[in-house]
Image (cartoon, grey):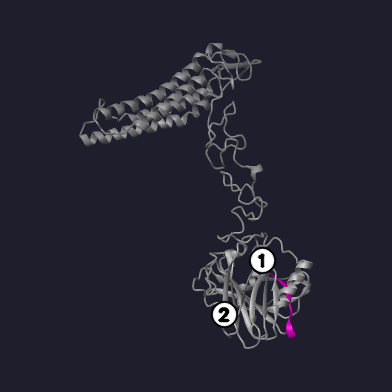
């Protein structure tokens, strides 16, 4: 015990190598220790909670397996894990399984920890000190349990033989590739200074572990065949991935945009198009948004990058909340203008003289409003029929939708077709009448839907009441009205496109 404390103090004075950019399995904070009893074969256990250990803590177990002096002791002190053994055979194990019971192992206690989530490919075991007493080796056994087998039968053991002295001022990191856990057999793992350590891999009866579904981890110090009082000190237990934080209780060390939790850019989330606002190379960031200026995402109707679908005043014609169409024209059709009376209109949007619209253009307005009025009339007629015959149809919400849609058509028509025509240097600068009529399609759709819906409800009511159908009490002409209005709108749009509004000026 004194040897370990002395060595730790020495290493703290000279400094140890930091292993940056790696998932931390255990930072070895929150000190604690456990020592075996003098009774051979009796294990002593302890659980030490720690936010800097995967699963929220680690469990200790130490056992004196042979006769002799001293005890087997496992301890965490000053960000290091130490194992010391008296002049007897012994062993100890530290387990990370997300469970506070140190007497058992929960094979799926870590959920399904993915050790490759931050591009890691290997564990890094940092050896700070091994005294290699009387040239007698000690084995470190690293076991990974697969979370898919709750009975613990699916696991892989990699036993690493420590057979050389080390007591340098910095951690001596041994690299344990994940690939070694895949199949049983022998191999060697690399370490600094061109050295390597022999390993033996064994697998459970349920097969080898999948390192993307790890449910528990254990690290054992096997001094069973070494009665020479070995001492071992390890640095924080990490992987070679790009992140340095300990995985959270969900087993995650990166956010959904692959940003390490310890990064100031972590958890910035995504924009409404599902694009990460922060992430590694290849992601789109806040300064490189892909939604258009009206807030629409690729694939959404009317998406137009980068400007969005706007009217001539720059107002969005469509978009998600809080984007909405706001008519910025005054009564003369001037963007952000202040004129309130039609007779005062003299200047157009571009500051050119304004010529009053001719009879053809005003006829377009009348035709558009008549078509909306026809659908509203069909709806209102069927509402009256339902009320007369007490059909029990609720129309409060529908009435509001019909009224709102009709008023929007009427107001928009007045604004579009009465704004006049600008004449600048012999050429006309006008609104696009056809596009403005098309932009009212959603309002006509509301009128069509409500008229068709009430007609069907009246039809069912009449059938239930055995009322004969006829021109005086039926709703059969609604579908024809809808068809005629649609055809009329298409015809009006074509006329708008063909009409030269400057012809008479």
Identify the residue at image location x=52%, y=26%: 436
Residue 483 in view: no
Q: Is residue 146 visible?
A: yes
The crowd level at tag 1 (other Cα within 10 Å; few <14, some 14-19, many 20+) is many
Q: Nearer the viewer, residue 264 or 377?
A: 264
- Residue 238 shows which numbered tag? 1
Type of secondary structure dominating the magenta stretch: strand
Q: In this image, 378 relative to 275: left or right?
A: left
Q: Mark 2 highlights which residue?
A: 43
Q: Residue at x 57, y 35 (%)?
A: 294
The part of the image, by quadrant, that contains residue 261 is bottom right
How far, Cα to Cα, is label 2 from label 1?
Answer: 27 Å
Residue at the outermost left position? 466
Along the viewing direction, whichever of 247 and 386 lies nearer the viewer: 247
Q: Which mark is residue 60?
A: none
Q: Residues within 10 Å of mark 2 (few under 14, many from 20)?
A: many
Quadrant placement of the C terminus: top right
Q: Residue at x 69, y 60 (%)?
A: 21
Of badges 2 and 1, the one in the foreground is 2
- 470 displayed left or right of 134: left
- Magenta part of the protein: which range? 123-135
- Quarter-wise, where is residue 35 in the image? bottom right
Q: Position of residue 158 (x, y in %)?
A: 63, 76
Percent x, y for residue 67? 62, 88
Residue 139 magenta: no
The image position of residue 76, as x and y in percent, is: 65, 70
């Amino acid at each position: 015990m004194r040897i370990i404390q002395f060595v730790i103090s020495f290493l703290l004075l000279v400094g140890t190598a930091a292993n940056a950019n790696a998932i931390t399995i255990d930072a070895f904070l929150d000190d604690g220790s456990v020592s075996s009893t003098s009774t051979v074969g009796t294990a002593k256990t302890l659980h030490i909670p720690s936010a800097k250990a995967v699963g929220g803590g680690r469990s200790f177990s130490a056992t004196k397996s042979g006769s002799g002096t001293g005890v087997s002791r496992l301890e965490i002190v000053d960000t290091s894990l130490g194992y010391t053994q008296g002049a007897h055979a012994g062993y100890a194990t530290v387990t990370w399984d997300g469970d506070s019971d140190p007497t058992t192992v929960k094979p799926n206690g870590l959920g399904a920890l993915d050790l490759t989530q931050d591009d890691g490919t290997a564990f890094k075991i940092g050896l700070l000190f091994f005294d290699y007493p009387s040239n007698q080796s000690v084995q470190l056994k690293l076991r990974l349990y697969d979370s898919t087998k709750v009975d613990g039968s699916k696991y892989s053991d990699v036993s690493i033989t420590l057979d050389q002295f080390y007591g340098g001022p910095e951690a001596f990191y041994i690299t344990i590739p994940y690939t070694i856990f895949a199949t049983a057999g022998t191999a060697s793992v690399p370490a600094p200074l061109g050295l390597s350590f022999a390993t033996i891999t064994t697998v459970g009866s349920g097969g080898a572990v999948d390192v993307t579904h790890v449910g528990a981890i254990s690290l054992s110090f096997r001094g069973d065949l070494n009665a020479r009082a070995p001492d071992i000190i390890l640095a924080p237990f990490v992987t070679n991935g790009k992140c340095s934080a300990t995985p959270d209780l969900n087993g995650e060390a990166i956010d959904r945009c692959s940003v390490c939790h310890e990064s100031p850019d972590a958890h910035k989330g995504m924009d409404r198009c599902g694009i990460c606002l922060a992430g590694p190379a290849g992601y789109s960031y806040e300064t490189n948004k892909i939604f258009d200026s009206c807030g629409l995402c690729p694939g959404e109707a009317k998406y137009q990058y980068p400007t969005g679908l706007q009217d001539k005043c720059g107002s969005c014609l469509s978009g998600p909340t809080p984007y909405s169409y706001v008519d910025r024209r005054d009564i003369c059709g001037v963007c952000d203008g202040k004129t309130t009376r039609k007779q005062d209109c003299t200047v157009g949007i571009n500051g050119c003289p304004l010529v009053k619209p001719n009879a053809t253009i005003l006829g377009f307005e009348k035709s558009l409003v008549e078509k909306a009025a026809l659908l509203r009339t069909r709806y209102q007629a069927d509402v009256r029929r339902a009320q007369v015959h007490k059909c029990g149809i609720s129309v409060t919400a529908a009435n509001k939708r019909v009224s709102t849609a009709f008023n929007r058509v009427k107001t928009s028509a007045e604004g579009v077709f009465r704004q006049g025509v600008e004449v600048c240097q012999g050429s006309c600068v006008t609104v696009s009448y056809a596009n403005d009529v098309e932009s009212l399609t959603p309002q006509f759709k509301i009128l069509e839907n409500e008229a068709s819906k009430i007609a069907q409800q009246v039809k069912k009511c009449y059938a239930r009441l055995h009322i004969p159908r006829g021109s005086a009490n039926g709703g059969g002409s609604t579908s024809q009205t809808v068809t005629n209005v649609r055809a009329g709108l298409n015809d009006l749009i074509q006329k708008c496109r063909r009409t030269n509004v400057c012809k008479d000026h």
